[in-house]
Structures are given as C-alpha cells and as structure tokens.
Image (tube, rainbow, N blue to C red):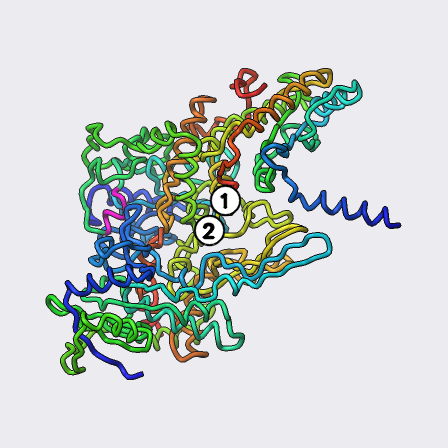
Amino acid sequence: MANTKTDEKLQKIAKDLLESGEVNLIIGYTKGSNPQRMRPVFITKPEEVVKLTFSSNAVQDLAVFLKKQEVKKYGKIGITVKGCDEKAVNALIQEYQLSRDNIKIIGMQCNGVIKQSLADKGETKVSETTVYDKCLICQEHTPVLYDFLVETEEPELSISGNVKPYAEIEKLEAMSAEEKNAYWAKEFDKCIKCYACRQACPLCFCSRCIVEKNMPQWIDTNSEEPGNAQWNLIRAYHLSGRCIGCGECERACPVNIPLMLINEKMARDVYNLFGYKSGLDINAKPVFGVFSENDFNDFIK
Amino acid sequence: MEDMNVEKEKQKEGTASANTGSQSDPRLIAFVCNWCTYNGADLAGTSRMKYSDNVRVIKLPCTGRIDPLFIVEAFKKGAKGVLVSGCHPGDCHYTSGNYHSRRKYATFRDLLGYLGVDLNRVEFSWISASEGNKWVAVINEFTDKIKSLPDKTTDIFTKK
Amino acid sequence: MEEKYFEISTENLKKFIDGIITDNYEVIAPTDKDGDTFYGKINKFEETNLDILLPKMSYKEYLLPKTETLFEYSISGVDTEVKDGLQNIAGANEKRVIFGGRPCDAGAGPIMEKVFNWDYKDEFFNERFKNLTIISIACEKPDNYCFCTEMQLSPESSYGSDILLKKSGDKYFAIVTGEKGLNLVKAYSNLFTETAKDKVPADKDWKKIFEVEKTKSFLDKNFEHNYFQERFLSCIGCGVCTYTCPTCHCFDIQDEGNLKEGRRIRNWDSCQFGIFTLHTSGHNPRVTQGDRYRQRLMHKFKIYSEKFDKYLCVGCGRCSRNCPEDIDIKEVAKNLAEMA
C-alpha cells in the first residue's frame, strides 16, 4: 500500500521540505488501527516520511491541527490536505489565524473519501453510495491552492445523479415551522454536549468558546432542551458563511446529529444572499467582515 | 419606609424577568440603536403618541452591537417577540454598523427559520430619529401579529 | 446469592422480552437508529439488533444522566420552596431492564458504584443503580478494538449482570447472579428450565495481548515521558472517548435560574477539555492535550486501581472506535506495557 506512486511522490515532497529546513513539521496521514482507517501523523525527521500515505480512507481534516497551540509551536509547517480541507487552510489565512508564509500546502487530488462507518464494516470501493455527501458536491477535487500537488491514481468518481446529496435540506425547507421544530427537537434531544463538533472543526479556533463564558451564562449548560438547541444554534451561526463543508463535526458526533444539514443549508443561503463561498480565495475578505449597500433588505421594515 | 420596601420588592420582580406575559398580553423586547430608533421612540413619547405597552426597549450603541445572542437570550427568558431596529442604510452614526448588522441578521434569520422558529416572532426595522409615527406603527403591528399567533407554540427555546 | 443456571430457547427468549414489555417494563436494548445502533427503548423484541457487537454509546446515561437536577427552588414573595431532586427519581429504573448489552457494559456498573460510594454516598447514583436490571449476552466474536480480557473481565463474564445469557446453538444458557434476575426468571418460570452448572459450556480460553499490570507499572514511573506529548499530538480534545465510555463518570455542577426559580444540575464533563482544570487565576496544570490524555490513561490504569483494586476500564473499545482521529487505547495500553 505504501509503495504506490502517490505515496512515493508525497514522501519525496515531505522529505525535501524537511531536509531543506523549509518546514519543521509535516502533518500527514498514516495507516490507522485497521486497514480501512487512517490517522494523522506528525513528522519531524526526514527518515520518518515513509510513514506518510494517502487513500480514500483519509477522512480527517488535518487543518484542524493548525489551531492547536502544541502544533503552532513548530512554526513552519507542511500539511497534507484534500481539496475540502485545503479550503479550511484558506479560511484560516483569510481570518488571520495563519500566515501563508508559514505553511506549505501539499495538495492531494482526491476523488472522494469513503464514509468511515461503512469503511469500518469493510467497504473498500469508492462510489457515489459509499462516499460522503460532501464528495458528491465537491468542486475542488484538485485543491484550489497548493505549493505541491500530488495527482491521484484513483478513477474519477462517477455520479449518476441517483444519490441526491443533502436531500434532507429541500425536505426541511418545504416543512412548516412546527414540523421543522419537531425534526430538530428530536435531533437536538440526542446531543450530549461533548462539543466534539467544535473540537473537530478547523474553523472553531476561539481560545474561549461562548459556552465556556459564564458571566453571563449565554448558553445554558444542561444537555436537555433548550440548552442543546441553544448550543447547536449558536455553533451553526458562528460557522455561517465560514464553514467550508469538510463535515468533520458530523463525523465526530457520537450521537449522529446531522450537523451538515445545517452547515450546508447556511452555506447555500450565504451564497444566495451574498454570492460568497468560504475558503476559495485567500485574498477575499470574510463575508461578515464586509458589506454591500445593496445587500438583501426585504426582511427589514 | 414601607413604601420603600414595596418599591424594592417591585424592582426585584422586574429583574427576575419571569413575568413574560401571556399570549393575550405578550412581552416583546426591542433592541434599538442609540442614535436613530431610540430617538424615534423618544419622539413618539414626547409627541404624546400612544403605542402598545407590551414592548420593553433595550438601548444599545448601534445595531452592529446587537449580537444575535441577545435575541436568543430574550427568547430564552420567555419573550414572545423580538424586534431589532436601527438607523436607515447610509445613516449609521458609525458609518457602517447597520450594514454589517443587516448581513448578520439576514443569515441569522434564515437559520432561526430553518431550525423551526416562527419568523413572525422576530422583526427588523429601520426607524430614524424623526420617524416617531413609524415606531408607533411598527410596534403596534408587531404586537397585533404576536397576539394573533396560536397560543401554544413550541420552538427550540421552549422548555419541555 | 449463589449463581443459578437456566436454559431458555431462542423462541422463549423472545417471548420473555415481549412479556416483560407487556408487564410495563421499559426495555432498553441495542436498536437501529440514525444509521447506527444505539441503546434505546424498544416496544417489541423485533426492534432489537443483537447481531452487532456493541451499540455506539454505552448505557451510562441510565445510571448517570447527561443532566441531573439535584434540587429545584422557587421563590414567591417571602416563601421559598426547595424541592430535592431525589424525589423526582425515587424508584427510577425499578421497571427498567437493559437487555442485550455486553459483559463489558455490565462490568462498568459496579466499577462506577465504587467511585460513587467510597466517601460520600451518592444517593442519585445509588437509587438508579440498585434498581436497574441488566440482562447481558456473552460475546462470541470480540473485534480488534475489544480488550475486556486484559481488563480483568472476559467476553463471557457475568460480573455486573443480573442475568448473563450465553448462546449455545438454538438456545441460551442463563446465568442468574442475583435476586433481581431471579425474580424476573421466576415470574416467567414457564419459559426457563433450571439446569446445573456443569451443563453450561465452559468459558473459552481468551488470549491477552498485553498485561495491564505492566501498563500500570509504566505509568507509575513515567509521568513525564515524552510518549504522551508525541502520541497525543493528534488528539483534538473532543471528549468523545470520555462521553462514550461506560466508566468515565466526571461531572460538573452548575446552577441555572433567576431570582424566582432555578435549579442546581450536574452535567457530564470530560478531562479532555482544556477548561476542565483551568484555575480561576488563569493557570492550567494540564496545558497540552498530551497532558490531558495522559490523565485519562492515569485514571483508567493507575489511580483508580490503587484505590479500588480494579481498573477504571472495561475494555469495550468504544473510545477507539469512535475517536475521530483514530487513537486506539488498546494499542496505547499495549505500547505502554511494552515500554515498561
């Protein structure tokens, strides 16, 4: 597995970067706890690059580590990213959390990653029924920004259109307020407030989250209604127009709340209202950092 | 002395915020900016115009300062409706606070609606310092709308 | 009570479960929902999914709810009324049966009970724990993340279960360990046939891949070892390991309310959160995620065992299966044992 052309190229890039001292750390994927799993690996020595590998099981968004203090310490960092994850790197640069000079982006061409829940059950084929919904709507199979590109050898993902990504969104939009409320009440009831959605998110980088502020206590601490709903509402709002759709929150959620239905809906709304998509251009201003005099005004009396 | 105690008791009642009104007498919260809408409301008052007394006004420097969390907080404490109001586009005392606010609220409103909150309960308006009559109209209309809503609505802010 | 042994056919087991549901028992069993299997209330036997190894979450919430009201107060005028939360849960779990869990989950109950009783007797936990009836099914095929054998249990251990069912062909052997289980069996005595201990198939010889004592002896000596910082650089501090864990029991006490009414609650908490150990001064004794994961390992494999002579881990492997960054605690414990 480790000897495919993709891996060789990836390892060579990483080795060169470390040897030349251009970066102090490479964040990449390595083999995980079972053959269908990958895990993050942190490489500081050139001889260790053989650990690096990539496949359609590389589900994690490694950009999440760029917000970690322990990782920031390394200074110049090389990171292995898929197209979706790379948008998180862009968004972090846009929001001044990261300097473009301190990051070397090793872009991995990717034709979809297999849902982890299926992979754990033995699924090995990349197809429209086995990949995440985000892969079906992906426009960035090749990352939009990279210093090095590793081309994929995987065949292109064939999309017949029979599987409708995020189909629930349209269903929800058509519902009445009461039906929507019933839907989300049921989902949020499951929430255990572990905040894994926040921790797994590359863009939730606040050093002190709103739920941890208790003077005043904005968000109720209980894991019942309405504390859960308040948390999920505010989490989604804070990511509106910022979420790049990597889906890590939903994957991390131990109780399977369909968080991407909210994130994707908000991304669509922000695009419809302001024509902005997050993470595509490091020189663009974040959508809520700017305004237009002609912004949508219909809802205001 | 006794009067003072009664007065204190009353104040306590007020801060306790449990009195959020019934459907026939709903409590509405209006978050307004200091420079336009608040003065508009002031003008309505000094002009002896009458408007619904269901509303409680909370003044902030600018609509740009009105965090969506304030709306969440108001609903959490049992408000039946929330109004956010500020200067007309182009008139912001801080040049662009209301433009930023408009972007935020266009999105936040969508999110509330998507999560099943009845959007009749949140209202936005631009009211200038000279528009006392608009303030009266907006408040009265909003109050009537809230009163006309079904009695038993549950949403994500409702306790079980 | 001495263990008693019964036989029950697969057909009768179904009748037994449907029967206790008719008798107004709330039966919590592995059931399919949201694309995975979770413990949940079932209305009939068919809703169970007994084919899977373990539900995604443990059933800890029936012993230690994610939010528990300790007391409530209300003030009107000069009258203050305080209501003890214990009143709300009196008799909780009396009519609740957990069915189809595994020996690891069952083993978690007594392990938590020690924590909730070593000094202060936690009435909330005890009220729930003493009444809950647990009917487990022995595992036939543990997966690669399981390590109950290493944790002083086994896939066929009856520790913590009121009734342990062991499948054998088209019937089950029921090992009844206590009064609660026996009462249920007696109530449905037409479905069970009593049998002798030697009729029950002997436990298989489950192999261990590491010695937990060695893990402990490594932890005894290597608090500052670099392994923790390096290995857990990939930990994002999401706390999924602790929230899905059947034995993790940390909680946080919070007050909610205003001048008129309110309550004191306790919520689940996790040692993986930075704020968990943050002092008021701003100092945090556990700065890095390496420190925090080390704490989890220490508590599981060292601190608890020094006090209670057992380990605070049942080897269910949920933390490994659910970890978004694929940290496998079995592999970690094995690594540590090898380094000892």
Residue where numbered disc 1 is placed: A231
Q: Which residue is denoted by mark 2 in the rendering?
A: A193
Q: Main secondary structure of the magenta part?
A: helix
Does the magenta segment cover residue B43? no
Q: Residue at 37% of width from left, 50% of height from top? A: A255
Q: Please indicate, yes or no, whether residue C226 appears anywhere in the rendered image.
A: no
Front residue of A126 and A39: A126
Q: Position of residue C20 (x, y in %)?
A: 28, 63
Are the residues flagged by discs 1 and 2 from a single subunit? yes
Percent x, y of residue B38: 72, 25
Above or below — where is C96 with respect to A290? below
Residues rendered magenta in the picture: A114-120
Amino acid type, mark 1: Trp
Instruction: Say what amino acid the circle numbered 2 marks.
Output: Lys
The answer for how far apart the CA atoms under marks 1 and 2 are is 8 Å
Q: Position of residue A118 (x, y in %)?
A: 23, 47
